Every structure is written in C-alpha cells, then in structure tokens.
Image (spheres, helix red, strand yellow):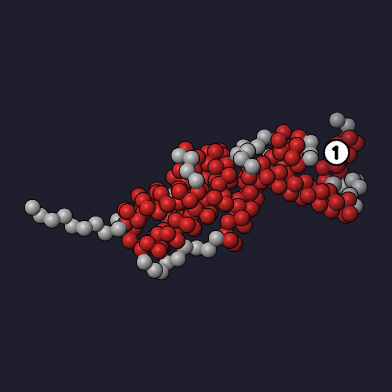
Amino acid sequence: MSEGGARKSARGRSGKGMRPKPKGETDGRVLRSVRSRERILDAIIELVGEGDLQPTGERVAARAGYGLRTVYRHFEDMEGLYREVQAHVQKLVRPTTPRPVREGSLEERVAALVEWRVEVFERAAPFLRSGASLRWRSAFLAQAHGRMVRELRDDLTRSLPEVVEHREVVEVLTSWEVWDSLRTDQKLGREKARRVLESAVRALLSPRPRSKRQ
C-alpha cells in the first residue's frame, strides 16, 4: 500500500475526513430500528400465544410484515428478545392476580393458593411451554425458570406453614409441570384439574386420626 493510501486509510479508521451523518438521519434510523424490533417482538408474542412454541424466522417475518434479513438481524440478540418476552409475561400475569391469602382456615388457604396458581399458569401457559422447550439453550430462560420456582416456593411456605414436613411433595403437586400434565396429558378441564390439585393438597396436609391399638 502506498504512503498516501495508508494515510487515507488511517483517516478513515479515525473518522477524520468522513462526512458525519445528520442528526435527524441517525435518529430516524434508530427510531425505525426500535419500531421494527417492537413489531418483531409483537409477532413472536402473538405466535407463541397462539401455540407456536418455537416460531421460525419465516413465520415471524410473515406475521411482522418484514423480510427475513430484518428479522434475523434482530434474532442475533435472542437473549434480549427472551428478556422482552418475559417482561410481557410479567405484565400479563402480575397486575391481575393477587397473591394467595395467608389467613383463614387450612382449607381456605389451600383453596386460595391453588386458585392463584391456576390463574397464573392459565394466563402464562403458552409462554411457560415455550420457555420449557427453549431454556436448555438460553441462560436467561433457565435463570427465569429458577426465579419462578423460588417465588412459588416462597408463596407456598408463607401461605401454608403446615407444609414443613411435606413441602417438597406439595411443591411438586402445585408446580407448573403437574398443572400442564393435567391439562394436556390428562385432558382435564380447568375446573376439574383445579379440584384435583386442591383435593390432593388438602388430603396430604389434613391431620390423620391416630390408629387404635389392638
């Protein structure tokens, strides 16, 4: 390379001699990028909500109305997209589902806990199924699942202090995985599945009469 060429190359790398882009042009590009990402995210949320647990780039592009190149450019940041989908799920569930009650009889507290979990699981079902199918390859989704498990465990021990001896069993009984099995594998309706869970927890925690000695 000639000395003059080297100087031109150095100026190019340092940014000298290059015409800066007008601020309006830069802002417009940023805004368009934000809008396209929002449309892509909306497309993913719609598809997952409809039961497409791992929507392909082609299906997302068709729903969002963009070309594959635009979609794949945003798909390079999958962990970021997972975070945004998770934020959507949190908004979907939390504002409309009060925490389970921590006062009252055992039966009342069991009923409130089960009903709360049913409401949360039903609202978030397609996203929980999608997360379960993807978290093996996503550190963020694996961490989010761990947080959900810890939150459910904390609610359980606060609402039902009686579970000390049987906490692990009750935790499994009232987990998302068991609920999903009742709804999909056993094909139970929401109300019947809820009654099954409530009856199982109450039976486990109810005091048993002492057997009489012969």
Q: Residue furthest top?
A: 1
Residue 80: horizontal and vertical position, in percent? Answer: 65, 47
Is there any visible trace of residue 155 in the rendered image?
A: no
**Tag count:** 1
Look at the image and tell me in which quarter the N terminus lies. Answer: top right
Q: Relative to the observer, which residue lies in front, 127 or 57?
A: 127
Q: Residue furthest left?
A: 214
Q: Relative to the observer, which residue lies in front, 109 or 169?
A: 109
Q: Relative to the observer, which residue lies in front, 98 or 30?
A: 98
Residue 141: horizontal and vertical position, in percent? Answer: 55, 45
Q: Relative to the observer, which residue lies in front, 68 or 159?
A: 159
**140 shown above or below 115:** above
Q: Residue visible at 45% across and 48% down? A: 193
Residue 43: horizontal and vertical position, in percent? Answer: 71, 44
Give the left or right position of residue 194, taking residue 15 as reference.
left
Q: Residue visible at 90% across and 52% down? A: 22
Q: Residue visible at 88% across and 32% down? A: 2
Residue 124: horizontal and vertical position, in percent? Answer: 57, 50
Q: Which residue is mark 1?
A: 9
* Secondary element at tag 1: helix
Amino acid type, label 1: Ser
Q: Residue visible at 81% across and 52% down? A: 31
**96 shown above or below 26:** below
Is there any visible trace of residue 42 in the rendered image?
A: yes
Q: Residues within 10 Å of mark 1 (few under 14, many from 20)?
A: some
